[in-house]
Image (cartoon, rainbow, N blue to C red):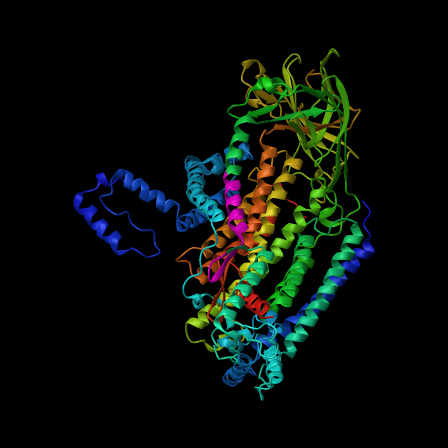
Amino acid sequence: MTKNPTQQKPGSTAQKGAAGAKTTGTPAVKAAPANIGFLGMLRWAWRQLTTMRVALILLLILALAAIPGSLLPQRIQDPIRVSTFIEENGAWGEFLDRVQLFDVYSSIWFSSVYILLMISLVGCVLPRTNQHWKAMRQDPPRAPRRLSRMPGYQTFRLAVDPDAGTDRPSATAAAGGSGAADSAAGGPGDSAAAGQSLLGRAQQRLKKQGYRTVRLDDHIAAERGYLRETGNLVFHASLLLLVVTMAVGSLFGYSGQRVLVEGDTFTNSLVSYDSFEPGTYFDASRLDDFRLRLNSFESTFDDQATGSQFGQPRSFEADITEFHEGRETRHLLEVNQPIRVGGTGVYLTGNGYAPVFTTRDSQGTVTFSGPVVFIPQPEASGYGSRGVVKVPDAEPDQLGFVGFLLPTAGLNDNGELISRFAELRNPYVVMNVYRGDLGLDDGIPQSVYELEADDMVQVTDASGSPVTLEMAPGETVELPDGLGSITLEGVDRFVALDIRHNPTQGLMLVLSIFLLIGLGLSLFVPRRRMWVRVTDREVEVAALARGEDPRSEHAAKDLALELQD
Amino acid sequence: MDVNIELATWSNLLIYSAMAVYAIAFIAYAFDLFGGRTLNSAAGGRKATAAVAASAGGGRVRRTARTSSSVAVLDPETATGPAADAGSGGGSGAAGDAAEAGSGGAVTSARTRSRRLARVGTALTALALLLHVAAIVTRTLSVMRVPWGNMMEYALTASALAGIVYLVVLKFRDVRYLGTFVAGAILITLGLCITVFYTPAAQLIPALQSYWIYIHVPIAILSTALLSISAALAVFQIVKAATEARATPRWLRFMERVPASGNIEQVSYRIAAVGFVTWTFTLIAGAVWAEVAWGRYWGWDTKEIWTFVVWVVYAAYLHARATRGWGPTKVAVLNLIGFASVVFNFSIVNVYFNGLHSYSGL
């Protein structure tokens, strides 16, 4: 938005300048005046940026810019979905990727909007803080000459002898202005004294109501609601600091994931993580030194409810032992019950079944034995889970099994095998077998949940159709062609843990609380100026709302009534 | 795991009963707002009010009249002019004062529209709300947990709160012109609850089992209720402003019974301001809960994104009010955009978007 005027032709600059002068006062963003030089241009841009108008437009753009992140898959949530999306959508997907629509919240365009907003905020908050600081140390401003122009205005005759109960003054509505009974009596000395005493009372009352007051020769000036602006500034400053703190936290924090099968132990060091995302300035040597062992995991699902609620999870409970600084602590880890070790949080983010397999070659020698993590498939019912068993030590060929676990196997109306319930009531594993080269020796890391079947062929039976193995726990199936056998020993449980550290989290909370308090003050504390003036025999009470204040006119009326009593 | 099926059935029956009563309230309110009988009596009313104003001005303004002056008036003729001091209630308070002062006579018959139907509507709305709340209570008792564990329960509770907010506002301002829309909107919401959103009574999924469900969700529901009332007022404000600017078309004649757009704007703004604070609280409490449940306070989950969008739009609304060049109608449109985002966040995001907040139970 800051065009360098030196790049423009002199003629066009002059025209622009003239246009700029003409549009003064219109609500649209003004064009820059000509011939102000680069610095002048910057100053102009700064002034524009810090106007409410521009801040408002930036806010609206920010809201709009945040939306695509909810419509398209985002890398921060699900990088795999993003890559499938790009593959499926070809050039269009690549274009979306190039304009950073899969990384909306770290994109240049999103960042620039909120950074501009932050700058605009600074440019607004700093001068206002300065102003407010001065205003707080100054007396409330003197009464303007014509108080009757104020929105809340009351006037009444000064009662000189307060004991004369019969002819008390009456208030008149400012606009009505129709006269009240004239109760003039007594000399000018009396009236001056009465005026001073009324001002004294007025000042006392205003002070009691929390006004800051100053007594001037013929009037009281009062102001209240400084907290409104204080709250406003606290809110905006907290917001600024919140964004900065958020950024700092992500620079120094880390997050990692780890899958643990019952009986496994996790040691908090880089090599133990399945995946790890450090902040830019994260230092691996500062990982908290602790170990966690998953003793057991239990889950329950609803078998009472009807309709969509049937089969919904009701509890996930992991029994975990923590080893930290020579102490052992037992924890019950649940979804809303993280374990906190030092500054690190351990969260239960997933769980599932890990069937235990044993494979033997044709001689009966064990080639593989242990639990294999099967991932619950979102599209499958009742925790139907998919997993891969890789047996590199099998002879003569390496073997790979792609399996599907049905915790409570049953047939649906179409006669297909499905899982009816998420608990292990009738577990059943269905598998296909592949033989060949697993590709584990290439040095290229591969997923433990996928079979790289490029160099493998599916094992078939005598008739040439693919072999499908079906096993319940305890059952053993012989493979064709002397490939040996596989046994389903049982089914263990696993949990997926998120291990995270964010050093600025606590500060974020503190700032959020300040933000909320500041917001409340800035919206609900009425800010108002009041004046009470006595001239000759007339008393004027006026109120001026500064910002939203529904009660300012009543405040003037109330004070006028109180002062007459 | 226990669910008291009998109580759950009672709850559904109570929802149906509440719907029936809301429907009658809706009709009563609609006749009050749109009924044609007194639409042409504006001229007579204006004269009478002037008399009230004169007499009130001559006498002392009693402090008792103070509270009523903040009350918006349904009939525009009493809202305009110096009579604003005398306030609503058909100026009966001011008229009484005038009679006491002995300076005014024939003003006690100030012609205000008989609003019997509006009173009936309000009474029925209150009754329907009782049934509605009873439905929530029985639902709660049937599962012995908070009544906002899924989309249906959220809508059930939010609509009841919207009704309560409406009645509370009614204590301060005569906003009965909103009644048709409040009763109608609650009726539609309950209809959705018992059909498309319907979820059988059951226990909570583990992700919702936290004391934060007592803090984060009810405030979110309250915000939704507040912002919905504010948005309804904003609609009236926009239409009223349009009829103020030029001649009122015939089918909008009922808008003459609605107070000046400036008055509506103030009420709408104040409710939205409270709603914005509660929404901010919702957002912060949600972030704290997200840290406990998922390990991070903010992760741009779809629900988080839309909560943020709503927050920013309402922030823009509050700023626009203080910005030169933004007229009240434009500002009110921002309010409506904000509320549209709230509705989108609740409906579309819950049902169609994948995210961590998939609690709709559908």
Where residue A265 sits, quadrant-wise, is: top right
Where residue A206 sits, quadrant-wise, is: bottom right
Nearer to me, B238 or B259:
B259
Q: Residue B353, can we see it?
A: no
Residue A181 position (above or below residue B21)? below
Q: Is residue A230 magenta?
A: yes
Q: Position of residue B179 (x, y in %)?
A: 61, 69
Q: Tell which residue pokes out farthest to the left in this image.
A: A11
Q: Quadrant for the N terminus of chain B, please.
A: top right
Q: Position of residue B89 (x, y in %)?
A: 61, 76
Q: Which residues are the magenta region?
A: A215-240
Q: Is residue A11 magenta?
A: no
- The residue under the point 24% across, 40% down is A37
Where residue A480 sits, quadrant-wise, is: top right
Q: Tell which residue pokes out farthest to the bottom in this image.
A: B106
Taking the image as shown, residue B149 lies to the left or right of residue A534, namely right
Q: Residue B171, can we see it?
A: yes
Nearer to me, A377 or A146:
A146
Taking the image as shown, residue A118 lies to the left or right of residue A295, namely left
Nearer to me, B29 or A6:
A6
Residue B330 position (above or below residue B299)? below
Taking the image as shown, residue A137 lies to the left or right of residue A376, namely left
